[in-house]
Amino acid sequence: MTAGYKDIATPTRTREIIEKYGFHLKKSLGQNFLTDINILHNIIDVAELTKEKAVIEVGPGIGALTEQLARAAGKVMALEIDQRLLPILEETLAPYDNITVVHGDVLKLDVPALIKEHLEGYESVSVVANLPYYVTTPILMGLLESGIKLDKIVVMIQKEVAERIAAKPGTKDYGSLSVAAQFYAEARVEMIVPASVFVPRPNVDSAVIKLAIRKEPVVAVKDEALFFRVVKASFAQRRKTLQNNLVTNLFGKDRKELATQALERAGIEPNRRGETLSLQEFATLANTIYDFMNENR
Ligand code: SAM
């Protein structure tokens, strides 16, 4: 704790702040504030911040995580959609001179331009946040697909989504989200967090997930858009075989033969299910289909 300042992240202080401003939490904006300092400290440890590094926070709320980030990192840029929180943040974060709060929707803001404006010159940029759960997947996939050079993404999200993101082939949680996220990053569930540490309590348990962004692609893919189409098609109906899913959702019924031939050439058994394929196998399959489509135009 910085000398003389109470942590925001306690149930008492959180309630005090909410009452002082007569703030009504909006469920529709995923406003569940963290009130457990130990969990925040764990998040900071996982993020491995230093004063040479910068960090982006999505949704600072009343600033509980933001102040911990400001103590650990060189600079914090916090993006908050709810205008009513801005005067509150101005007061709660007043002791810190290394935080910029930007008002806006993370899905609409020009994040690369904001990084250039506020975070240039730092060794790396990570995203650390307790995400609003109603937009977890669009925020994460948006960041991963954006091409923004990030070091890590360390976020609190619904437990169930965290498990899907980090799932390994052959498990029930493994799906197109696992493949898409693991294409860009190494994913690990760091801790499970009970609903009781939030005000108000969400209806689901939460988890902190770490996505260590890959510096080099883990698999060589000839056409990224096609790779993702193949992955999506392969998981479209989980109980169907890979061949049937590819016929129905990619090649079309009148080109069934092509699906069979492509799988054969890729060395993948047509009766397997999408959920058993590794990232490498999806890459091999997508690259084979790419060559195949070019030959059979
Ligand atoms: N960081 C705080 C904490 O840990 O206590 C608050 C986390 S709360 C789960 C999510 C925050 O994200 C809220 O402050 C909410 O207003 C904000 N938010 C919701 N949708 C957003 C969006 N599209 N862009 C930016 N912030 C958003």
Image (cartoon, grey):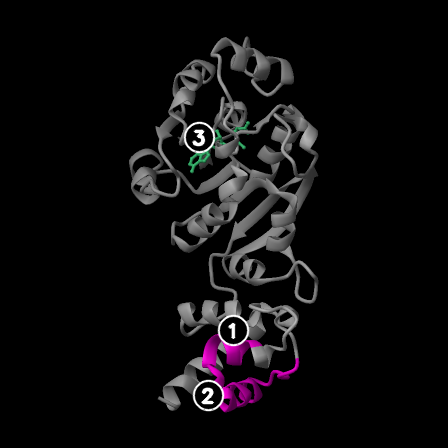
Who comes first in sequence, dot 2 or dot 3? 3
| Residue placed most toward the observer, 140 or 81 | 81
Magenta segment: 245-271
Q: Are marks 1 and 3 in contact (CB under 8 Å)?
A: no
Q: Which residue is mark 1?
A: 283
Q: Which residue is mark 2?
A: 254
Q: Position of residue 95 (x, y in %)?
A: 45, 14
Determine whether the beta carbon of the residue marked 3 sits less than 8 angstroms from the nearest atom of ligand 1: no
Q: Residue at x 44, y 16 (%)?
A: 88
Q: Position of residue 182 (x, y in %)?
A: 55, 59
Q: Dot 1 lies on which element? A: helix
Q: Measure the C-alpha gap from mark 2 to mark 1.
A: 25 Å
- Against 263, residue 32 (above or below) is above
- Against 267, residue 123 (above or below) is above
Which numbered dot is residue 74? 3
Specify the principal SS of the magenta part.
Answer: helix
Three-letter residue code for mark 3: Gly
Q: Are marks 2 and 3 in contact (CB under 8 Å)?
A: no
* Viewer-nearest of discs 2 and 3: 2
State which quarter of the image contains the N terminus.
top right
- Against 171, residue 245 (above or below) is below
